[in-house]
Amino acid sequence: MIQNTDAVTGAGLSVEASLVKCTLQGTARLPAFSIDGDFVLGGAFFLHFQTQTVVNNYTIQPELSRCTGSVNARDLHFTRTMIFAIEEINNSTKLLPGIRLGYQIYDTCSAVPVAVHVAFQLSNGQDAVFYKGSNCSQSSVVMAVIGDSGSTPSISMSHILGSFNIPLVSHFATCACLSDKHQYPTFFRTIPSDYYQAAALAKLVKHFGWTWIGAIHSDSYYGNYGMATFLETAYREGICVEYIESFDWTHPQSKIQRLADVIRRSTATVVVAFTSPGDMKILLKELALQPGPSRQWIGSEAWITDSSLMSFTFCTGAIGVAIQKSVIPGLRDFLLDLSPSKVASSSVLTEFWEDVFNCTLRKTSHPNKRACDGTEDIKTLKSPYTETSQLRVSNMVYKAVYAIAHAIHNVVCHKENATIHCNKYIRLEPKQVLTELKKINISQNGYHISFDKNGDPIAFYELVNWQKSESAIIEPVTVGYYDASLPMGEQIRINRNLTWLEDGTQVPVSVCSERCPPGTRKVLQKGKPICCYDCLSCPEGEISNMTDAPDCILCPKEFWPNTEKNSCFPKPVEFLSFGEVLSIILATFSVSGACLAIFAAVIFFRHRSTPIVRANNSELSFLLLFSLTLCFLCALTFIGAPSRWSCMLRHTAFGITFVLCISCVLGKTIVVLMAFKATLPGSNAMKWFGPPQQRLTVLTFTFIQVIICTVWLVLSPPFPVKNLTTYKEKIILECALGSVVGFWSVLGYIGLLAIFCFALAVLARKLPDNFNEAKMITFSMLIFCAVWITFIPAYVSSPGKFTVAVEIFAILASSFGLILCIFAPKCFIILFQPEKNNKKSLMNKN
């Protein structure tokens, strides 16, 4: 905090304006690394992970929070990378020539209060007292700040620095919340936002078919926002989460133990961890105490490439997203260019040197430690500080420095005659650097540097897999990449083999329920997530042609499912075809009946002059035999695929030929009655029912049926139709009646004539002739009526093609009844008992 004091005015001095005396309140925090320059850059890194707890009694001024614990070798590596980049720029003749950049790099101790104090100090400077023309509201000595290494402290710092228009460019703060330019207008980052990382992790999980996972995350801005974004994307991808747990390394050990037990007892094989390296290390240490079932770890970029975690061998096979691997020429030599004399000039480097080599450079610091004797060689050290084989986040620091340097260059430098001129005396304001940073679009060391409207770079991740090397050391191996700029479905590419779990070669399975095969549908289990379901077979008539189908689909009305219910095929079309055994039998009887009628006609014609033929009205007999022949043959029209013409022909031909047949039988019956009455004394009945009247009777009765059939055909004729209702699994090709009234009118008229004929035949059955034709007609009509009475219920109840078979059977049965009852006895006498074929035999009384 800076406070205004008395204005300074020189009574005897000539001053143009009064100067405000500004006094720094509190104790200034010393930078871990600093150097003067024409323009100064700020830096904030986690050089320590702990702070000293101070209990304030409010009687004295509180002391500054001091960082404690071991030096964080990884962030020391980042810090030295920033210094390397600044020195590289200072030695450049193309970027900011003649201008020297300085730096002030602070340790934020991974603590928000310290980060806030650092932000204020970077805004105010370190001068205890200074004078300013109007007020003390702004006296920043830094043009921009690089850091912090975490999202939570970066959020706090951005709120403060943003008030003074000081750009904050982070190399490792990935919280998607920082993309909000309304809250963080001066925040930029060279690392992609967690929005893309979460999407990449969700698509990675989906890529391998894992739908049942566990999720853990750090209880911080980074973990909370990152996991929320991941879950949002995962739910859209159809992924279910068995448990979601948050934790922090500062939590009680009992909570860490409880989380470890949750992971051990879970049924999910895959665990997605959106955590910081420090939190992950605490959890893995707890899991290592009592190893449980193998788990497939999916890691966020914060910890998946952290070499300090790769000692936990039960995490072999872990896969996650990582910042793109890079090469920074000269960086390794710079990092290893440390000697005891150079280290002694920095308290942080001294502390690091003493930690890693377990010796002391200061005589008073550790009396029990051995003194460093100069044989310590940092080149032999295995540490995150010296690790340069897979530079990832280091490149983000490097790019951040160059982005700021180019922004400053664009303000203070101009090109004239191929020579770059820079003005180091210009009063440069952080706001000018902020404006130029938004326009940056450069390439440095082969890596593109630019920011979108939210201050984010283009999202590109490598997919890394923890694999054991030949020396049995776990190493992060790049196995693919995720590129958010590619179209959906092409963003993830796997280009080499992966190791699963502990040296496994098979992709682990992590599902709540096995996938439902085609032919089934998913039915959710009550009270469980959508990934927990049962597989039920599709209902009748429905199919599913995809795995994990939520619903079955109905086949089109002319299609039916196959046995597996995974596809529809056309329903078989069924009709009474000529190739079927039943059709052959019926056709045989039909032709045989027609031949029998013709045979009887031939016999009658050859013996037309004999008494038995002449006595039975040969003209009506021949007409009856002709109509019976047609009745037998019309049965053939019912066989075969129905067509428009066959449907009209079969019903009308059947109706007309049967009426013709019944009319002839009726005529013969009337003739028998008239003939008996003619034998009575004084009777002249035959005069009124001679051959002309007989022909007219047959013609009239038949003509009435022709009229009925004609009206039926004109108004609503029969037509072929596909019957889809009788059988669900097949189509019945049949003739629709058209007009039901027409059909039953035809049948009713036939039945009416048959009953009338039957009644007359019953009346004439006991006439005292030796050969009484009325008895045969009675039997034939009895058979006829019995057949057609039973036909009606059989016709209505018979399914499909059997309906047609029943109709054919009724036609043939009634036709055979007529020909056998009426003509068989006569033909038998003519052929086998010719001695009875005389007038005397016919006229004898019983």
Image (spheres, rainbow, N blue to C red):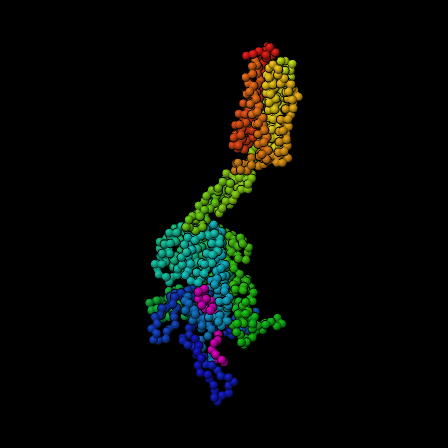
Quarter holding residue 613: top right
The residue at the point 57 percent across, 29 percent down is 748
Question: What residue lies at 34% left-to-right and 70% top-to-bottom?
Answer: 55
Q: Relative to the observer, which residue lies in front, 394 or 770?
A: 770
- Specify whether residue 138 is painted magenta: yes
Q: Where's the C terminus, which quadrant? A: top right
Above or below: residue 782 compared with residue 832: below
> Can see residue 468?
no
Looking at this view, name the residue that lies furthest to the bottom. Answer: 12
* Front residue of this view, candidates 226 and 560: 560
Residue 196 shows in this picture: yes
Q: Residue at x 47, y 62 (%)?
A: 175
Where are the magenta residues, as a range?
132-159
- Asked if 286 appears above or below 76 in the picture, the reply is above
Please identify the quadrant where the N terminus is shown. bottom left
Vertical side of 366 occupied by 753: above or below: above
Residue depicted at x 42% and y 67%? 112
Provide residue 476's location: percent of width, then percent of height: 46, 56
The image quarter in which residue 628 lies: top right
In the rendered image, residue 578, in percent from the top left (x then y), is placed at 59, 29
